Image (cartoon, helix red, strand yellow):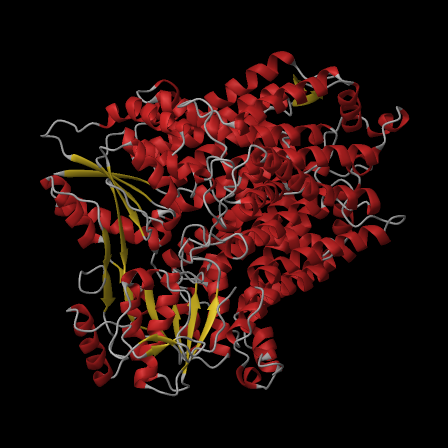
């Protein structure tokens, strides 16, 4: 306990709280590493939320629900890929349109699922480990999706750092013309990265509707997709920092609510903007220190690729 | 095998034809959607696209079209200049909020004094507020090379929190029974941005939008600065040889788009919206990005795109009312329209060639 | 009113009102609604829509209704209201506080159309207001929570620090304290009416602080789920019954029940005796519904709660009855006194004993 705040509970709470944005941000990271800026994360998340929910309720299986959420997110991302990679439309505008489309689509699909309870997602059976003081609730007290999300972050980290394909992906994101000249299939790789990103966003959405809330309501992502975008920037496109970023964003929300609950009068609005200000500062520091080295953002981020020769 | 060959110049023919094709494609796809939802597709398309313009109450809705399109056009006109130069301000929503806050603050500080100077002062404050919010990413980009896309986006969230703070704190109406939100500027004659001609929807913000369209059109097509901006966007290296200073360009583009977004926010809060509340910003800054691209970053195109976008909002509300279509269906419909418009743009920039593409 | 806006108003009235004239007597009367959220929000807008449908059924063919959902507050609301008026709706319900000024403007343009604005305070000849005394439901919740709490800590998730919510916190605290002098109330502001993730975190924070009751003035079921996970925490449904969480953690609920009011007003319109007035209805008028008190509540507590409901309902008891002091210790209501509605409607302070600070 520090100042009336139970740190263990806070950490345990923010881990679960951050899982949706952690998943979505990890997915977006892969897409951005491949050089594509997809601002449609919010749209993919909410479609994942409704699809995962509908699937879980219909089949009675949360596992199938999460699979359905991931699939739906990936499908929406494929639409984005089709437009931006094949039809070479502008990524910023297409991403914004994707969010609009996803919000509408999810509401249409979700009619009839309001007020329904989904099947529960179980805790990981760690047995007595979960009862350990301090580390019990933090490490062993979560549902299995929390561990899946952590595994995915680790997987993406290892993939980008060590896998040959990961290296190629980064090359595509840095300089698509050079990568193309080396014989790599820029468009195919980007589409795959986008689909993966969409799947993770969908998974994050499904976590919201199946575990966090758990219920389906229109507009339930309430801006989580935008936070995921901020986290990728905060993380300066590094998977391990995405974890830190997601926990920081989730942590500040959890902390400000806990401070209120503990009876502190705090400037809520300024705390709410704090993570974004910190993100800007991080960006500035990164850019300033990388001036003469490798830049933090993938160099080809947001630019369309067309093989002109 | 179909290959794409980049056109040396965007096709004039296709740049006029593709929007029409996209709208037709949307009507077909949307019609299918409406039919699936059990509504008469022809009636729905008519209610959305025809009735607001030529239906029984069109006189009112044509004016509303301007009210809705005004801020979109004003913001998009500024954004497009930057986008042409390859400078990506996607934080117009934040600049819109800060502009509105600055303008409204001036008015609320002066309340209840009546003066002819008040409204001009608000205009200046609104533009200045948006300009400052746009200059933050500009300065950071110039000094540290920080991506303006990301900084401007982050600043939207900061502005939103700031807005909530202002609406619940310093700008709260002291006579508002404890409810959040400022005094209504519509009831403060010196600060009010009224309808200039009754029933037309025309207010100073719409006038500003038209002025911005003309000014940016002249700038981009007739002025040397416009030439530099285009060169910077299309051939950054050549631009450097041609003596274009990237730092100056970044400051100019972000400053301009920020100021125009701030103005849009100020006109909106002093006019149609009337008061600062924590949710008065209805996403205009983001929608304007779409409008800028729908208009192909061209001033005249933006004018039309803004009106088209506004039409789908107004027609969408009508479709809800007349046919019981849910808003969700309207959102999907708008999404499809944007997808088709963005996707079909390919034909303007590229030539399709069947068979093996040559250089 | 300055000359310019006067001209504008009369011109608009002349051109627009003609369209909104009453339709032939045999036709059903059209009644319109605008909602701030989607009808699928399962909370505020959903409850208004449920009532709309009940009204249509109850008046059996004498009225037809239509609605526009997801209307942003501001110019869009003004346009949506005008659309409804132009379409010949004779009575229009604007169901969010933020629609207030837009409704006032449109009502002035259409003197022949009747308007009703929920939770606001501005009225006109053709503009009535209506609201529910949600605090009456909070008094019941406070009583149950005060009796049942083991930790003597009650958590309250507030949306925004506005009078409606402050009334609720005070009412809950006063009645919990009445039956349990050791009780404390902890308040967390979510600054949102609906944000499932944040509401879940707020509930978790309150539970971490030792609260075993969570009262919410936000509309999602996320706090219910958190309470269920914790196992020993109880909740009350808010806005809708939230019956999915019966019989525990949700042990009762406060339901926004607009149907009796809508039916009454539509009937008045049909009968030709609609008048502009301000209605602030509570449990007695059915506007505030108390959902089933489940088996998780001990019988004697349930009986006590039901007795309180009966007393509030028949008007023999007001949840704010003196002696009551303000948070700073100054006097508010003397022994046996109750506040004027006008004062209560603008309530902006906590009562004595609540330790939470009012946000500035």
State the image quarter where residue B73 is shown: top right
At which x and y percent is residue C199?
Answer: 46, 64
Number of disc labels = 0
At which x and y percent is residue A264?
Answer: 55, 74
Q: Residue at x 81, y 26 (%)?
A: B235
At which x and y percent is residue B323?
Answer: 29, 32
On the question of residue B129 being in view, the answer is yes
Left or right relative to C165: residue C257: left
| Farthest-out residue, top | B13
On the question of residue C249 being in view, the answer is no
Q: Nearer the viewer, residue A222 or B77?
A: B77
Q: Residue at x 64, y 25 (%)?
A: B297
Q: Residue at x 38, y 60 (%)?
A: C219
State the image quarter where residue B186 is shown: top left
Can you say which quadrant of the picture contains the N terminus of chain A? Answer: bottom right
Left or right relative to C333: residue B81: right
State whether residue B264 is above or below residue A1.
Answer: above
Can you say which quadrant of the picture contains the C terminus of chain A? Answer: top right
Left or right relative to C181: residue A280: right
State whether residue B208 is above or below residue C244.
Answer: above
Q: Nearer the viewer, residue C210 or A176?
A: C210
State the image quarter where residue A270 is shown: bottom right
Q: Residue at x 12, y 26 (%)?
A: C24
């Amino acid at each position: 306990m520090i100042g009336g705040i139970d740190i263990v509970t806070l950490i345990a709470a923010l881990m679960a709280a951050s899982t949706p944005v952690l998943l979505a941000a990890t997915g977006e990271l892969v897409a951005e590493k491949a050089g594509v800026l997809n601002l449609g994360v919010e749209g993919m998340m909410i479609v994942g939320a409704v699809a995962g929910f509908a699937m879980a309720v219909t089949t009675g299986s949360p596992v199938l629900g999460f699979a359905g959420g991931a699939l739906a997110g990936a499908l929406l991302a494929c639409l984005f890929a089709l437009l931006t990679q094949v039809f070479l439309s502008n990524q910023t505008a297409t991403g914004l349109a994707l969010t609009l489309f996803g919000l509408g689509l999810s509401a249409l699909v979700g009619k009839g699922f309001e007020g329904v309870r989904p099947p529960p997602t179980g805790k990981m059976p760690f047995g007595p480990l979960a009862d350990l003081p301090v580390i019990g609730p933090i490490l062993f007290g979560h549902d299995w999706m929390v561990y899946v999300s952590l595994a995915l972050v680790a997987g993406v980290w290892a993939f980008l750092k060590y896998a040959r394909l990961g290296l190629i992906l980064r090359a595509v994101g840095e300089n698509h013309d050079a990568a193309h000249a080396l014989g790599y299939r820029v468009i195919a790789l980007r589409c795959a990265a986008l689909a993966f990103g969409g799947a993770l966003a969908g998974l994050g959405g499904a976590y919201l509707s199946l575990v966090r809330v758990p219920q389906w309501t229109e507009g339930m992502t309430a801006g989580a997709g935008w936070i995921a975008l901020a986290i990728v920037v905060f993380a300066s496109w590094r998977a391990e920092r995405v974890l830190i970023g997601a926990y920081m964003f989730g942590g500040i929300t959890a902390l400000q609510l806990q401070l209120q609950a503990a009876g502190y009068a705090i400037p809520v609005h300024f705390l709410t903007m704090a993570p974004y200000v910190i993100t800007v500062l991080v960006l500035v520091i990164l850019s300033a220190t990388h001036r003469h080295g490798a830049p933090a953002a993938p160099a080809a981020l947001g630019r369309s690729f067309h093989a002109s020769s | 095998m179909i290959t794409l060959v980049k056109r040396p110049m965007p096709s004039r023919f296709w740049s006029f034809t593709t929007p029409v094709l996209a709208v037709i494609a949307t009507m077909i796809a949307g019609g299918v959607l409406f039919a699936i939802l059990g509504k008469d597709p022809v009636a729905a398309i008519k209610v959305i696209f025809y009735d607001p313009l030529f239906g029984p109450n069109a006189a009112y809705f044509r004016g509303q079209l301007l009210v809705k399109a005004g801020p979109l056009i004003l913001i998009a006109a500024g954004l497009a200049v930057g986008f042409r130069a390859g400078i990506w301000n996607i934080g117009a929503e934040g600049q819109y909020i800060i502009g509105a806050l600055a303008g409204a603050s001036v008015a609320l500080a002066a309340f209840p004094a009546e003066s002819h100077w008040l409204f001009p002062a608000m205009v200046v404050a609104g533009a200045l507020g948006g300009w400052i919010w746009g200059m933050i990413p500009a300065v950071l980009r110039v000094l540290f090379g920080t991506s303006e896309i990301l900084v401007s986006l982050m600043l939207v969230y900061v502005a939103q929190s700031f807005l909530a703070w202002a609406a619940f704190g310093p700008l709260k109406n002291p006579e508002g029974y404890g409810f959040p939100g400022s005094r209504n500027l519509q009831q403060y004659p010196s600060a009010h941005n009224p309808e200039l001609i009754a029933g037309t929807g025309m207010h100073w913000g719409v006038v500003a939008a038209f002025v911005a369209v003309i000014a940016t059109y002249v700038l981009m097509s007739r002025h040397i600065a416009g030439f530099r901006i285009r060169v910077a966007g299309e051939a950054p290296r050549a631009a450097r040889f041609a003596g274009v200073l990237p730092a100056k360009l970044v400051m100019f583009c972000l400053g301009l788009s920020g100021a125009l977004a701030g103005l849009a926010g100020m006109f909106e809060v002093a006019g149609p919206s009337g008061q600062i509340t924590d949710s008065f910003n209805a996403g205009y800054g983001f929608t304007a990005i779409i409008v800028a691209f729908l208009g192909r970053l061209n001033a005249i195109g933006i004018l039309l795109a803004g009106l088209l976008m506004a039409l789908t909002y107004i027609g969408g509300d009508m479709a809800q009312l007349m046919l019981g279509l849910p808003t969700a269906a309207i959102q999907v419909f708008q999404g499809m329209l944007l997808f088709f418009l963005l996707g079909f743009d390919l034909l303007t920039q590229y030539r399709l060639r069947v068979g093996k593409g040559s250089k | 009113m300055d000359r310019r806006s006067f001209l504008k108003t009369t011109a608009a009235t002349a051109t627009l009102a003609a369209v909104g004239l009453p339709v032939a007597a045999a036709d059903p009367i059209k009644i319109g609604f605008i909602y701030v959220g989607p009808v699928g929000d399962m909370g505020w807008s959903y409850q208004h829509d449920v009532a709309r449908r009940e009204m249509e059924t109850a008046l059996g063919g004498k009225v037809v209704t239509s609605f526009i959902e997801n209307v942003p507050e501001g110019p869009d609301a003004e346009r949506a209201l005008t659309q409804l008026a132009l379409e010949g709706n004779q009575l229009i319900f604007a169901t969010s506080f933020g629609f207030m000024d837009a409704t006032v403007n449109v009502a002035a343009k259409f003197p022949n159309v009747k308007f009703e604005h929920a939770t606001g305070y501005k009225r006109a000849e053709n503009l009535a207001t209506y609201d529910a005394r949600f605090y009456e439901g909070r008094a019941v919740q406070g009583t149950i929570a005060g009796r049942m709490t083991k930790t003597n800590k009650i958590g309250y998730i507030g949306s925004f620090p506005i009078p409606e919510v402050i009334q609720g916190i005070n009412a809950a605290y006063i009645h919990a304290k009445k039956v349990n002098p050791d009780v404390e109330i902890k308040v967390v502001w979510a600054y949102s009416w609906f944000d499932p993730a944040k509401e879940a975190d707020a509930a978790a924070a309150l539970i971490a602080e030792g609260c075993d009751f969570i009262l919410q003035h936000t509309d999602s079921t996320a706090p219910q789920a958190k309470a269920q996970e914790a196992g020993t925490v109880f909740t009350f449904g808010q806005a809708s019954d939230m019956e999915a969480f019966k019989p525990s953690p949700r042990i009762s609920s406060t339901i926004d029940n607009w149907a009796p009011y809508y039916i009454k007003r539509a009937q008045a319109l049909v009968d030709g005796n609609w008048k502009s007035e301000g209605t602030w209805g509570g449990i007695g008028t059915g506007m505030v519904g108390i959902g089933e008190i489940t088996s998780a509540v001990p019988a004697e507590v349930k009986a006590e709660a039901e007795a309180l409901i009966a007393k509030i309902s028949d008007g023999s008891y007001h949840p704010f009855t003196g002696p009551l002091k303000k948070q700073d210790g100054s006097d508010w209501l003397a022994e046996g006194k109750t506040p004027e509605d006008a004062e209560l409607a603008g309530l902006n302070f906590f009562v004595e004993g609540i330790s939470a600070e009012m946000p500035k």
